[in-house]
């Protein structure tokens, strides 16, 4: 394995159909991604814990457990980006997948080039979230803990600690979103800025789902939020003073 291969993103593919898995891994390899194929949810969860992948592609119909449970356990134990690739085309499954922390949802049959494009889009969001948007927006690199209100956000561990000592874990998607917000407090950020994408589909509600989920974890009243405020027609605003250490 060359240095370039080692540094390329690692994607774990959870798919119980070998032929479909070969198509996925071949497409990813053709665009420079490393990939590993796992057939069961338990194998995937164990491997994710060992390798800390950049992204996991999850099929929902598995021989040992439901794919939604895999997504839930991934975000609880080994947070990472998640793309659901499944034959289920039900709106309830789509919403539940996003609620559990998935970044995207594709229904089979799929076009391999579209799958790669979606993977690139997801990874680009995380890369942009991890980099400062402007010279004055980010804390110095060595400062990885943000303090605001009654909370302490450890950006490296994806965890929130309340002043009462209780700790709340965040999924990768939630941590990336919160990192973007705390780096630019008291500024209106559009849905495009929060997703790290241009030309976001106006019907794409994934960012709104993540905001809702993040509000719940921060104890921010969804009906009258004080911390993450909705600016109608413009985006969202993180209304807090943020200190870094």
Image: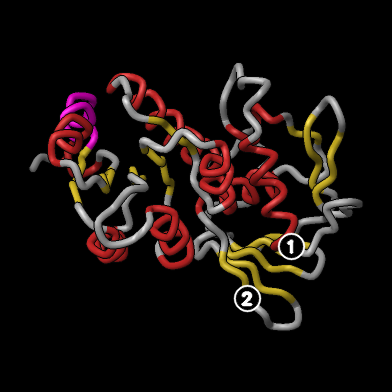
Q: Residue at x 36, y 35 (%)?
A: 87
Q: Position of residue 15 (x, y in %)?
A: 24, 45
Q: Position of residue 12 (x, y in %)?
A: 26, 47
Q: Work out which residue is located at the far top of the displayed protein and give it.
A: 199
Q: Which comes sooner in the sequence, label 1 or label 2?
A: 2
Front residue of 89 and 6: 89
Q: Is residue 232 left or right of residue 175?
A: right
The secondary structure making up most of the magenta span is helix
> What residue is disc 2 on?
167
Which quadrant is home to the C terminus? Answer: bottom right
> What residue is disc 1 on?
218
Front residue of 107 and 222: 107
Q: Residue at x 41, y 41 (%)?
A: 84
| Crowdedness near tag 2: few (<14), some (14–19) or many (≥20) residues, C-alpha within 10 Å | some
| Crowdedness near tag 1: few (<14), some (14–19) or many (≥20) residues, C-alpha within 10 Å | some
Q: Is residue 30 magenta?
A: yes
Give the answer, above or below, for where 98 lies relative to 109.
below
Residues in magenta, as a range: 25-33
**Could you tell me which secondary element the residue under label 2 belongs to?**
strand
Which quadrant is home to the N terminus? Answer: top left
Q: Is residue 58 left or right of residue 124?
A: left
**Could you tell me which secondary element the residue under label 1 belongs to?**
helix
Mark 1 vs mark 2, CA separation in Å = 11 Å
Q: Check whether the beta carbons of the residues at disc 1 and disc 2 lie within 8 A of each other.
A: no
Front residue of 168 and 222: 222
Q: Is residue 92 magenta?
A: no
């Amino acid at each position: 394995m060359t240095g370039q291969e080692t540094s390329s993103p690692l994607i774990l593919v959870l798919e119980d159909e070998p032929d479909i898995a070969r198509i996925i891994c071949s497409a990813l390899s053709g665009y420079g991604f490393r990939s590993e194929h796992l057939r069961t949810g338990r194998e995937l969860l164990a491997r994710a814990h060992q390798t800390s992948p950049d992204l996991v592609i999850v099929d929902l119909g598995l021989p040992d457990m439901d794919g939604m449970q895999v997504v839930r356990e991934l975000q609880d134990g080994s947070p990472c980006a998640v793309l659901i690739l499944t034959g289920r085309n039900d709106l309830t499954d789509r919403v539940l997948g996003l609620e559990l922390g998935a970044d995207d949802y594709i229904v089979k049959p799929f076009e391999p080039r579209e799958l790669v494009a979606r993977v690139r889009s997801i990874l680009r969001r995380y890369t942009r979230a991890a980099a400062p948007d402007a010279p004055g927006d980010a804390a110095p690199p060595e400062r990885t803990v943000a303090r605001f209100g009654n909370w302490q956000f450890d950006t490296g561990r994806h965890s929130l600690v309340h002043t009462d000592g209780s700790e709340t874990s965040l999924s990768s998607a939630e941590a990336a979103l919160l990192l973007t917000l705390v780096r630019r407090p008291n500024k209106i950020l559009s849905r495009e800025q929060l997703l790290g994408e241009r030309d976001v589909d106006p019907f794409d509600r994934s960012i709104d789902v993540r905001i809702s989920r993040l509000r719940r974890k921060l104890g921010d009243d969804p009906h009258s939020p004080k911390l993450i405020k909705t600016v109608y027609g413009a985006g969202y605003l993180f209304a807090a003073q943020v200190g870094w250490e």
